[in-house]
Image (cartoon, rainbow, N blue to C red):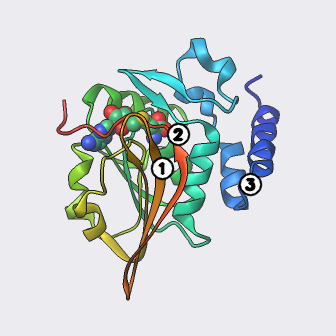
Amino acid sequence: MLSDRTRRRMSERLRQAGIEDTRVLDVMVEVPRHLFIDQALATRAYDDVSLPIGHGQTISQPLTVARMTELLLAGRTPGKVLEIGTGCGYQTAVLLKLGAEVYSIERLAAMLEIARRNLRATKLVHARLVHGDGHLGLPEAAPFDGIIMTAAARQVPEALIEQLAEGGRLVMPIGDEQVQHLWRFEKTQQGIQQSRLEPVKFVPLLPGRS
Ligand code: SAH
């Protein structure tokens, strides 16, 4: 139930659901999602559902992870990526496996510890994990080729736009508790191009850290 075959089946479902980037489809076969969630829920790890990961937070459903990653890559090499909302570290692992240089910020120290443990268990140890408030981005490591946020903000934090490299993409959910959409921003020579995409459901981006 937790085998390679199960993950291959999940990846095939993602392809049927419209994910086209084969790098993303392949990586989702490689990363053992069940190692990022509570053992009691492991049998549901490859269903297309979001699951609780403690501290009132959730791991996104595989289709959302694949979709956001594909939007972030936009057919290019991943380069230097900032993730906001480390959670259990699954999205971090996907980015690492794709060869990205990953910085990931989490506001809950306890959650960050869980991510650190999970990443270590999957031998993916080279992400820079930062305990902080993602609203501010990570100016000391900017600019980023990609920024991905896995919690919903009311509006796009200006600091994140500033920290994008030219040609860089920011993918994030924007909205309130009721209605959220995925947005994609790209920094071009002509300025910021933005598009609103499909509706999504994420936990809220909260201020400060604890
Ligand atoms: N990508 C994660 C999803 C985790 S849920 C995964 O694969 O598991 C979103 C996470 O964002 C939560 O862990 C939450 O604590 C964190 N978060 C919320 N507001 C934040 C902020 N301002 N800065 C950093 N992390 C934040």
At horizontal 57% and vertical 27% (from top left) the residue drawn is 35
Q: Is residue 53 above or below residue 202?
A: above
Kindly check if marks 2 and 1 are in contact, taking CB atoms under 8 A apart as contact: no
Residue 165 placement (x, y as % from top left): 35, 75
The residues bearing labels 1 and 3 have C-alpha atoms spaced at a distance of 18 Å
Instruction: Indicate which disc, 1 or 3, sits on the residue closer to the N terminus.
Output: 3
Give the labeled residue for mark 2.
123
Closer to us: 121 or 84: 84
Label 2: how many Cα within 10 Å (few below 14, some 14–19, many 20+): few
Report which residue position mark 1 lands on.
181
At x 39% / y 40%, what residue is drawn?
86
**Label 2 SS:** loop
Viewed as shown, does residue 207 lie left or right of 99?
left
Q: Is residue 5 left or right of residue 89?
A: right
Q: Please indicate whether residue 13 sits to the left or right of residue 79 in the image.
A: right
Q: Quadrant of residue 150?
A: top left
Q: Residues within 10 Å of mark 1 (few under 14, many from 20)?
A: some
Q: CA distance from mark 2 to mark 3?
A: 30 Å
* Residue pointed to by mark 3: 18
Give the residue type that dot 3 points to.
Answer: Gly
Residue 200: x and y in percent read 52, 43
